Image: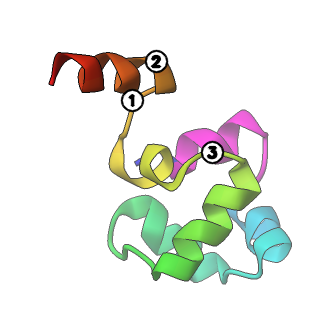
Amino acid sequence: MRLIDEREKRNLTQTEVAKMTGISQSMLSLMEKGVKSGSDATKITLSNFYKVPVGYLFFDDDITQSNKEDKEVKS
C-alpha cells in the first residue's frame, strides 16, 4: 500500500489530506497503518485525490499499460 508514500511525496499531513478529501484523519491514519482497509468509496476518493489507480495505491499493482499488453500477448 502506498498511501503514506503518495501523501509524503506531496508534503501533506494526514490532517491536510483528511480536510481536502472529507475522510476523517483517524480513518486515514488507520488505513495508512493497515488496520482498516476503508470502503470502496473511500479508496476511490483517495485514488482520485492522488491521481493514481486504486490498484497502485492499495494493492501494490505495478502493472503499466505496456506491461499489461505484453502479458496479454504472451497469454
**Residue 8: where, in percent of width, then height?**
67, 40
Q: Which residue is mark 3?
A: 52
Q: CA distance from mark 2 to mark 3?
A: 17 Å
Could you tell me which quadrant the C terminus lies in? top left
Q: Which residue is mark 2?
A: 66
Instruction: Name the dominant secondary structure of the magenta segment.
Output: helix
Type of amino acid at the residue the image marks with label 1:
Ile
Image quadrant in which you'd find residue 44? bottom right
Question: Closer to the observer: label 2 or label 1?
Answer: 2
Q: Secondary structure at mark 2?
A: helix
Q: Is residue 73 left or right of residue 62?
A: left
Q: Secondary structure at mark 3?
A: loop
In this rendering, the answer to whether 62 lies above or below 8 is: above
- Residue drawn 40% across the image and 48% down it: 1
- Residue drawn 32% across the image and 16% down it: 70
Type of amino acid at the residue the image marks with label 2:
Ser
Mark 1 Cα within 10 Å, few/some/many (few <14, many 20+)? few
**Residue 18: where, in percent of width, then height?**
74, 73
Type of amino acid at the residue the image marks with label 3:
Val
Q: CA distance from mark 2 to mark 1?
A: 8 Å
Question: Along the line of sight, which residue is nearer the eye, 69 or 16?
Answer: 69
- For residue 63, which numbered disc appears in the image? 1
- For residue 15, which numbered disc appears in the image? none
- Point out the stretch of residues depicted in magenta: 3-12
Q: Is residue 4 left or right of residue 55?
A: right
